[in-house]
Amino acid sequence: MKLVDPESPQALADRASFYNQLRDESPVARVERGDYYILSRYQDVDDLLRRHDRYSKAWGSQLAMFEHNIGMNQDPPTFDAFRAIYAGYMSPRGVQRWSADCHRIANELIDQIEPLGAGDLQPLFGKPLPARVTAIALGLPEDQVDRYRAWTDAFLRTMIGDPEAQARVIEEMYAFFDEQIAQRREALRAAHLAQPAPEHVGGVLPGGLISVLMSARYQDRYLNDHELRRTIRGFFIGGVDTTGGLILNVLYRLLERPELWQAVQADPALVEAAIEESLRFDPPAIGMFRGAARPIEIDGETIPEGARVLYSLTGANRDPAVFEDPDTFRLDRKPGATRSLPFGAGAHFCPGAWTARLEARIALEALVRRLPKLRLTGEVTHFEVVNFWVVRSFPAAWD
Protein backbone atom coordinates (compact mmCIF):
# COMPACT_ATOMS: atom_id res chain seq x y z
CA MET A 1 0.00 0.00 0.00
CA LYS A 2 1.33 3.42 -0.95
CA LEU A 3 2.46 5.69 1.90
CA VAL A 4 1.60 9.35 1.30
CA ASP A 5 1.99 12.66 3.10
CA PRO A 6 -0.95 15.03 2.53
CA GLU A 7 0.80 17.60 4.74
CA SER A 8 3.82 17.88 2.46
CA PRO A 9 4.39 21.32 0.87
CA GLN A 10 3.69 19.85 -2.56
CA ALA A 11 0.37 18.29 -1.50
CA LEU A 12 -0.80 21.42 0.31
CA ALA A 13 0.20 23.63 -2.62
CA ASP A 14 -1.97 21.70 -5.09
CA ARG A 15 -4.64 19.63 -3.36
CA ALA A 16 -6.42 18.75 -6.59
CA SER A 17 -3.32 17.26 -8.22
CA PHE A 18 -2.46 15.36 -5.05
CA TYR A 19 -5.88 13.74 -4.69
CA ASN A 20 -6.28 13.20 -8.43
CA GLN A 21 -3.03 11.24 -8.46
CA LEU A 22 -4.09 9.24 -5.41
CA ARG A 23 -7.43 8.41 -6.99
CA ASP A 24 -5.88 7.31 -10.27
CA GLU A 25 -2.82 5.47 -8.93
CA SER A 26 -3.59 4.43 -5.36
CA PRO A 27 -7.31 4.55 -4.47
CA VAL A 28 -6.41 3.30 -1.00
CA ALA A 29 -3.41 5.02 0.56
CA ARG A 30 -1.97 5.14 4.05
CA VAL A 31 -0.72 8.20 5.92
CA GLU A 32 2.10 7.21 8.24
CA ARG A 33 2.04 10.43 10.25
CA GLY A 34 -1.24 10.13 12.11
CA ASP A 35 -1.75 6.52 11.03
CA TYR A 36 -4.86 6.77 8.89
CA TYR A 37 -6.03 5.83 5.41
CA ILE A 38 -7.34 7.91 2.50
CA LEU A 39 -10.02 7.01 -0.04
CA SER A 40 -10.29 9.27 -3.09
CA ARG A 41 -12.24 7.41 -5.78
CA TYR A 42 -15.88 8.44 -6.20
CA GLN A 43 -17.37 4.99 -5.77
CA ASP A 44 -15.30 4.27 -2.66
CA VAL A 45 -16.17 7.64 -1.08
CA ASP A 46 -19.86 7.21 -1.86
CA ASP A 47 -19.71 3.71 -0.35
CA LEU A 48 -18.05 5.08 2.80
CA LEU A 49 -20.73 7.73 3.23
CA ARG A 50 -23.63 5.31 2.86
CA ARG A 51 -22.37 2.00 4.27
CA HIS A 52 -22.49 2.41 8.03
CA ASP A 53 -21.97 -1.30 8.50
CA ARG A 54 -18.48 -0.79 7.02
CA TYR A 55 -17.59 2.76 8.08
CA SER A 56 -18.79 4.10 11.41
CA LYS A 57 -19.16 7.64 12.72
CA ALA A 58 -19.57 6.48 16.31
CA TRP A 59 -16.17 7.96 17.28
CA GLY A 60 -16.72 11.23 15.46
CA SER A 61 -15.47 12.77 12.24
CA GLN A 62 -12.02 13.93 13.41
CA LEU A 63 -8.77 11.99 13.39
CA ALA A 64 -8.76 11.84 17.19
CA MET A 65 -11.50 9.58 18.50
CA PHE A 66 -13.71 11.04 21.22
CA GLU A 67 -17.34 11.59 22.27
CA HIS A 68 -18.34 8.04 21.43
CA ASN A 69 -21.98 7.63 20.32
CA ILE A 70 -22.83 11.21 21.37
CA GLY A 71 -25.25 13.28 19.32
CA MET A 72 -24.17 13.32 15.69
CA ASN A 73 -21.52 10.71 16.46
CA GLN A 74 -23.93 7.85 15.86
CA ASP A 75 -24.80 5.47 13.06
CA PRO A 76 -28.25 4.59 11.73
CA PRO A 77 -30.73 3.46 12.82
CA THR A 78 -30.21 5.16 16.21
CA PHE A 79 -28.93 8.30 14.50
CA ASP A 80 -32.13 8.66 12.46
CA ALA A 81 -34.16 9.63 15.52
CA PHE A 82 -31.51 12.13 16.59
CA ARG A 83 -31.36 13.75 13.15
CA ALA A 84 -35.13 14.24 13.24
CA ILE A 85 -34.69 16.74 16.09
CA TYR A 86 -33.17 19.39 13.83
CA ALA A 87 -34.02 18.20 10.30
CA GLY A 88 -37.07 20.45 9.91
CA TYR A 89 -35.35 23.50 11.37
CA MET A 90 -32.43 23.15 8.93
CA SER A 91 -34.52 22.14 5.88
CA PRO A 92 -34.55 24.18 2.63
CA ARG A 93 -37.76 25.82 3.81
CA GLY A 94 -36.64 26.16 7.41
CA VAL A 95 -33.48 28.14 6.67
CA GLN A 96 -35.50 30.83 4.91
CA ARG A 97 -36.30 32.20 8.38
CA TRP A 98 -32.92 33.98 8.45
CA SER A 99 -32.82 35.02 4.79
CA ALA A 100 -33.67 38.63 5.67
CA ASP A 101 -30.90 38.74 8.28
CA CYS A 102 -28.43 37.42 5.74
CA HIS A 103 -29.40 40.17 3.28
CA ARG A 104 -29.08 42.75 6.06
CA ILE A 105 -25.66 41.55 7.20
CA ALA A 106 -24.24 41.24 3.66
CA ASN A 107 -25.23 44.80 2.87
CA GLU A 108 -24.04 46.16 6.22
CA LEU A 109 -20.62 44.61 5.61
CA ILE A 110 -20.44 46.03 2.09
CA ASP A 111 -21.46 49.45 3.46
CA GLN A 112 -18.45 49.23 5.79
CA ILE A 113 -15.88 48.06 3.26
CA GLU A 114 -16.97 49.98 0.18
CA PRO A 115 -15.22 53.24 1.21
CA LEU A 116 -11.96 51.33 1.80
CA GLY A 117 -11.52 50.52 -1.89
CA ALA A 118 -9.31 47.54 -1.15
CA GLY A 119 -8.49 45.03 1.59
CA ASP A 120 -8.55 41.42 2.70
CA LEU A 121 -12.03 40.05 2.11
CA GLN A 122 -11.55 37.16 4.52
CA PRO A 123 -11.77 39.22 7.76
CA LEU A 124 -13.82 41.98 6.11
CA PHE A 125 -16.55 39.83 4.60
CA GLY A 126 -15.92 36.10 4.26
CA LYS A 127 -15.65 35.43 7.98
CA PRO A 128 -18.05 37.90 9.67
CA LEU A 129 -21.01 37.17 7.40
CA PRO A 130 -21.31 33.44 8.16
CA ALA A 131 -20.27 34.02 11.78
CA ARG A 132 -23.14 36.45 12.33
CA VAL A 133 -25.70 34.38 10.42
CA THR A 134 -24.63 31.23 12.27
CA ALA A 135 -25.01 33.08 15.56
CA ILE A 136 -28.57 34.05 14.62
CA ALA A 137 -29.40 30.52 13.48
CA LEU A 138 -28.13 29.04 16.73
CA GLY A 139 -29.46 31.79 18.97
CA LEU A 140 -26.04 33.12 20.04
CA PRO A 141 -25.07 36.80 20.40
CA GLU A 142 -24.48 38.29 16.95
CA ASP A 143 -21.92 40.83 18.15
CA GLN A 144 -19.09 38.49 19.17
CA VAL A 145 -17.59 37.84 15.74
CA ASP A 146 -13.99 38.26 16.91
CA ARG A 147 -14.51 35.57 19.54
CA TYR A 148 -16.09 33.21 17.04
CA ARG A 149 -13.34 33.89 14.50
CA ALA A 150 -10.62 33.09 17.04
CA TRP A 151 -12.22 29.77 17.93
CA THR A 152 -12.90 28.61 14.40
CA ASP A 153 -9.45 29.64 13.12
CA ALA A 154 -7.82 27.82 16.03
CA PHE A 155 -9.99 24.77 15.40
CA LEU A 156 -8.79 24.62 11.80
CA ARG A 157 -5.12 25.02 12.72
CA THR A 158 -5.20 22.23 15.31
CA MET A 159 -7.62 19.78 13.70
CA ILE A 160 -5.12 17.08 12.72
CA GLY A 161 -1.72 18.36 13.76
CA ASP A 162 -2.42 19.06 17.44
CA PRO A 163 -5.42 17.18 18.92
CA GLU A 164 -4.56 18.34 22.45
CA ALA A 165 -4.69 22.00 21.43
CA GLN A 166 -7.93 21.31 19.59
CA ALA A 167 -9.38 19.82 22.77
CA ARG A 168 -8.55 23.05 24.62
CA VAL A 169 -10.36 25.10 21.97
CA ILE A 170 -13.36 22.81 22.30
CA GLU A 171 -13.34 23.29 26.09
CA GLU A 172 -13.49 27.06 25.62
CA MET A 173 -16.40 26.76 23.21
CA TYR A 174 -18.22 24.38 25.53
CA ALA A 175 -17.89 26.77 28.45
CA PHE A 176 -19.53 29.47 26.31
CA PHE A 177 -22.26 27.09 25.15
CA ASP A 178 -22.91 26.13 28.78
CA GLU A 179 -23.50 29.80 29.60
CA GLN A 180 -26.06 30.05 26.81
CA ILE A 181 -27.82 26.87 27.95
CA ALA A 182 -27.88 28.13 31.55
CA GLN A 183 -29.47 31.43 30.47
CA ARG A 184 -32.28 29.53 28.80
CA ARG A 185 -32.87 27.34 31.83
CA GLU A 186 -33.02 30.45 34.00
CA ALA A 187 -35.63 31.91 31.64
CA LEU A 188 -37.71 28.76 32.09
CA ARG A 189 -37.43 28.99 35.87
CA ALA A 190 -38.43 32.65 35.81
CA ALA A 191 -41.51 31.68 33.80
CA HIS A 192 -42.28 28.89 36.32
CA LEU A 193 -41.90 26.23 33.66
CA ALA A 194 -40.52 22.90 34.78
CA GLN A 195 -39.74 21.63 31.30
CA PRO A 196 -39.17 23.26 27.91
CA ALA A 197 -41.45 22.51 24.97
CA PRO A 198 -41.31 23.41 21.27
CA GLU A 199 -43.96 26.10 21.72
CA HIS A 200 -41.61 27.97 24.09
CA VAL A 201 -39.06 28.59 21.32
CA GLY A 202 -39.28 32.20 20.23
CA GLY A 203 -41.22 33.12 23.37
CA VAL A 204 -39.96 32.17 26.81
CA LEU A 205 -36.89 30.77 25.08
CA PRO A 206 -35.08 32.84 22.46
CA GLY A 207 -35.32 31.65 18.88
CA GLY A 208 -32.56 29.53 17.45
CA LEU A 209 -31.30 25.98 17.20
CA ILE A 210 -30.04 25.84 20.80
CA SER A 211 -33.58 26.35 22.08
CA VAL A 212 -34.91 23.84 19.53
CA LEU A 213 -32.44 21.23 20.78
CA MET A 214 -33.21 21.96 24.43
CA SER A 215 -36.95 21.62 23.95
CA ALA A 216 -36.90 18.46 21.81
CA ARG A 217 -37.47 14.93 23.06
CA TYR A 218 -35.10 12.15 22.03
CA GLN A 219 -35.72 8.54 23.06
CA ASP A 220 -38.39 9.80 25.48
CA ARG A 221 -36.02 12.21 27.22
CA TYR A 222 -34.36 15.58 26.81
CA LEU A 223 -30.81 15.84 25.47
CA ASN A 224 -28.16 15.92 28.17
CA ASP A 225 -25.57 18.69 28.35
CA HIS A 226 -22.91 16.71 26.53
CA GLU A 227 -25.25 15.96 23.64
CA LEU A 228 -26.23 19.63 23.48
CA ARG A 229 -22.62 20.83 23.46
CA ARG A 230 -21.51 18.38 20.78
CA THR A 231 -24.42 19.20 18.48
CA ILE A 232 -24.08 22.96 18.89
CA ARG A 233 -20.37 22.67 18.13
CA GLY A 234 -21.02 20.79 14.91
CA PHE A 235 -23.34 23.48 13.60
CA PHE A 236 -21.12 26.30 14.90
CA ILE A 237 -17.86 25.16 13.30
CA GLY A 238 -19.49 24.09 10.07
CA GLY A 239 -21.62 27.21 9.83
CA VAL A 240 -18.70 29.63 10.19
CA ASP A 241 -15.74 27.97 8.52
CA THR A 242 -17.09 25.97 5.62
CA THR A 243 -19.73 28.52 4.62
CA GLY A 244 -17.15 31.30 4.63
CA GLY A 245 -14.87 29.02 2.66
CA LEU A 246 -17.61 28.40 0.10
CA ILE A 247 -18.32 32.11 -0.43
CA LEU A 248 -14.68 33.01 -1.01
CA ASN A 249 -13.90 29.88 -3.03
CA VAL A 250 -16.67 30.77 -5.49
CA LEU A 251 -15.55 34.38 -5.61
CA TYR A 252 -11.94 33.36 -6.28
CA ARG A 253 -12.86 31.20 -9.28
CA LEU A 254 -14.98 33.99 -10.74
CA LEU A 255 -12.30 36.66 -10.30
CA GLU A 256 -9.47 34.35 -11.36
CA ARG A 257 -11.03 34.33 -14.83
CA PRO A 258 -12.51 37.83 -15.31
CA GLU A 259 -14.71 36.60 -18.15
CA LEU A 260 -16.61 34.52 -15.60
CA TRP A 261 -17.10 37.53 -13.32
CA GLN A 262 -18.39 39.48 -16.32
CA ALA A 263 -20.72 36.61 -17.24
CA VAL A 264 -22.23 36.57 -13.75
CA GLN A 265 -22.64 40.34 -13.82
CA ALA A 266 -24.48 40.06 -17.13
CA ASP A 267 -26.64 37.21 -15.85
CA PRO A 268 -26.91 37.08 -12.03
CA ALA A 269 -28.86 33.84 -12.37
CA LEU A 270 -25.47 32.22 -12.98
CA VAL A 271 -24.59 32.76 -9.30
CA GLU A 272 -26.31 29.52 -8.34
CA ALA A 273 -24.50 27.62 -11.11
CA ALA A 274 -21.21 29.07 -9.87
CA ILE A 275 -21.97 27.95 -6.31
CA GLU A 276 -22.77 24.38 -7.37
CA GLU A 277 -19.69 24.19 -9.56
CA SER A 278 -17.52 25.52 -6.75
CA LEU A 279 -18.94 22.94 -4.37
CA ARG A 280 -17.84 20.25 -6.83
CA PHE A 281 -14.54 21.85 -7.84
CA ASP A 282 -13.39 23.37 -4.52
CA PRO A 283 -15.35 21.74 -1.67
CA PRO A 284 -14.46 23.72 1.49
CA ALA A 285 -14.57 20.49 3.50
CA ILE A 286 -12.21 18.23 1.58
CA GLY A 287 -13.21 15.30 3.72
CA MET A 288 -13.82 13.99 7.22
CA PHE A 289 -12.99 10.80 9.09
CA ARG A 290 -14.80 7.56 9.68
CA GLY A 291 -13.77 4.40 11.51
CA ALA A 292 -13.49 1.03 9.81
CA ALA A 293 -16.15 -1.12 11.48
CA ARG A 294 -14.51 -4.27 10.14
CA PRO A 295 -11.59 -5.18 7.84
CA ILE A 296 -12.31 -3.63 4.44
CA GLU A 297 -10.71 -4.83 1.22
CA ILE A 298 -10.49 -2.51 -1.79
CA ASP A 299 -8.54 -3.44 -4.91
CA GLY A 300 -6.54 -6.03 -3.02
CA GLU A 301 -5.61 -3.64 -0.19
CA THR A 302 -6.97 -4.10 3.33
CA ILE A 303 -7.96 -1.36 5.76
CA PRO A 304 -7.86 -2.98 9.22
CA GLU A 305 -10.78 -2.89 11.62
CA GLY A 306 -10.67 0.15 13.89
CA ALA A 307 -8.54 2.24 11.49
CA ARG A 308 -9.37 5.87 10.85
CA VAL A 309 -10.29 6.60 7.23
CA LEU A 310 -10.30 10.04 5.59
CA TYR A 311 -12.47 10.39 2.51
CA SER A 312 -11.44 12.88 -0.15
CA LEU A 313 -14.29 14.84 -1.72
CA THR A 314 -11.73 16.62 -3.87
CA GLY A 315 -10.71 13.34 -5.47
CA ALA A 316 -14.26 12.01 -5.71
CA ASN A 317 -15.74 15.19 -7.19
CA ARG A 318 -13.13 15.23 -9.95
CA ASP A 319 -13.38 11.56 -10.80
CA PRO A 320 -13.44 11.31 -14.63
CA ALA A 321 -15.45 8.11 -14.30
CA VAL A 322 -18.35 10.27 -13.09
CA PHE A 323 -17.76 13.84 -14.29
CA GLU A 324 -17.10 15.20 -17.75
CA ASP A 325 -14.11 17.55 -18.01
CA PRO A 326 -13.68 17.31 -14.22
CA ASP A 327 -10.69 19.64 -13.82
CA THR A 328 -12.34 22.63 -15.49
CA PHE A 329 -14.47 25.13 -13.58
CA ARG A 330 -17.55 25.63 -15.76
CA LEU A 331 -20.78 27.58 -15.42
CA ASP A 332 -22.60 25.65 -18.14
CA ARG A 333 -23.13 22.35 -16.31
CA LYS A 334 -26.81 21.52 -16.23
CA PRO A 335 -28.50 21.80 -12.81
CA GLY A 336 -28.66 18.39 -11.23
CA ALA A 337 -26.53 16.85 -13.97
CA THR A 338 -23.65 16.06 -11.65
CA ARG A 339 -23.54 13.69 -8.72
CA SER A 340 -21.00 15.64 -6.70
CA LEU A 341 -20.70 15.04 -2.97
CA PRO A 342 -19.79 18.42 -1.43
CA PHE A 343 -22.01 17.86 1.60
CA GLY A 344 -21.52 14.12 1.87
CA ALA A 345 -24.35 11.65 1.35
CA GLY A 346 -26.57 9.25 3.19
CA ALA A 347 -27.72 9.65 6.78
CA HIS A 348 -24.94 12.11 7.62
CA PHE A 349 -25.58 14.45 4.69
CA CYS A 350 -24.51 17.85 6.04
CA PRO A 351 -27.48 19.46 7.84
CA GLY A 352 -26.04 22.91 7.11
CA ALA A 353 -26.09 22.41 3.33
CA TRP A 354 -29.14 24.58 2.70
CA THR A 355 -27.91 27.36 4.97
CA ALA A 356 -24.56 27.41 3.18
CA ARG A 357 -26.21 27.64 -0.22
CA LEU A 358 -28.56 30.39 0.97
CA GLU A 359 -25.76 32.50 2.46
CA ALA A 360 -23.47 32.02 -0.52
CA ARG A 361 -26.19 33.05 -2.97
CA ILE A 362 -27.17 36.16 -1.03
CA ALA A 363 -23.55 37.16 -0.40
CA LEU A 364 -22.44 36.75 -4.01
CA GLU A 365 -25.49 38.47 -5.46
CA ALA A 366 -24.77 41.45 -3.20
CA LEU A 367 -21.09 41.57 -4.19
CA VAL A 368 -21.90 41.31 -7.90
CA ARG A 369 -24.46 44.10 -7.62
CA ARG A 370 -22.61 46.50 -5.35
CA LEU A 371 -18.90 45.94 -6.11
CA PRO A 372 -18.80 45.47 -9.90
CA LYS A 373 -15.11 46.43 -10.11
CA LEU A 374 -14.06 43.71 -7.67
CA ARG A 375 -10.72 42.15 -8.61
CA LEU A 376 -7.84 40.19 -7.11
CA THR A 377 -4.73 42.10 -6.08
CA GLY A 378 -2.52 39.29 -4.80
CA GLU A 379 -2.28 35.63 -3.94
CA VAL A 380 -5.26 34.03 -2.22
CA THR A 381 -4.00 31.75 0.55
CA HIS A 382 -5.67 28.91 2.42
CA PHE A 383 -5.30 27.34 5.83
CA GLU A 384 -2.78 24.51 5.62
CA VAL A 385 -5.17 21.85 6.84
CA VAL A 386 -5.30 18.45 5.21
CA ASN A 387 -9.07 18.12 5.10
CA PHE A 388 -10.32 21.71 4.64
CA TRP A 389 -10.01 24.21 1.79
CA VAL A 390 -10.77 27.43 3.64
CA VAL A 391 -9.36 30.84 2.69
CA ARG A 392 -6.89 32.47 5.08
CA SER A 393 -6.40 35.71 3.11
CA PHE A 394 -8.13 37.19 0.06
CA PRO A 395 -6.47 40.43 -1.17
CA ALA A 396 -8.80 42.34 -3.44
CA ALA A 397 -9.76 45.82 -4.63
CA TRP A 398 -13.11 47.25 -5.67
CA ASP A 399 -12.52 50.98 -6.20
Image: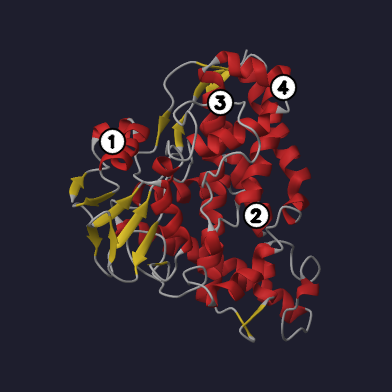
- Asked which quadrant contains residue 15, the reply is top left
Q: Is residue 120 visible?
A: no
- Asked which quadrant contains residue 22, the reply is top left
**Foreground disc of the pair 2, 1:** 1
Q: Classify mark 4: helix, strand or loop.
A: helix
For badge 1, the amino acid type reads Ala
- Say which mark, if any, is on residue 11: 1
Asked if disc 1 and disc 4 are in contact, CB closer than 8 Å, the reply is: no
Find the distance from the CA under tag 4 to the CA under tag 2.
28 Å
Q: Earlier in the sequence, mark 1 or mark 3?
A: 1
Residue named by callout 2: 141
Q: Earlier in the sequence, mark 4 or mark 3?
A: 3
- Say which mark, if any, is on residue 330: 3
Q: Earlier in the sequence, mark 4 or mark 2?
A: 2
Q: Residues within 10 Å of mark 1 (few under 14, many from 20)?
A: some
**Foreground disc of the pair 4, 3:** 3
Say how many tags the image has: 4
Horizontal and vertical percent position of residue 311? 38, 52
Q: Earlier in the sequence, mark 2 or mark 3?
A: 2
The residue located at (70%, 39%) in the rendering is 105
Find the distance from the CA under tag 4 to the CA under tag 3.
24 Å
The residue located at (61%, 35%) in the rendering is 275
Q: Residues within 10 Å of mark 3 (few under 14, many from 20)?
A: some
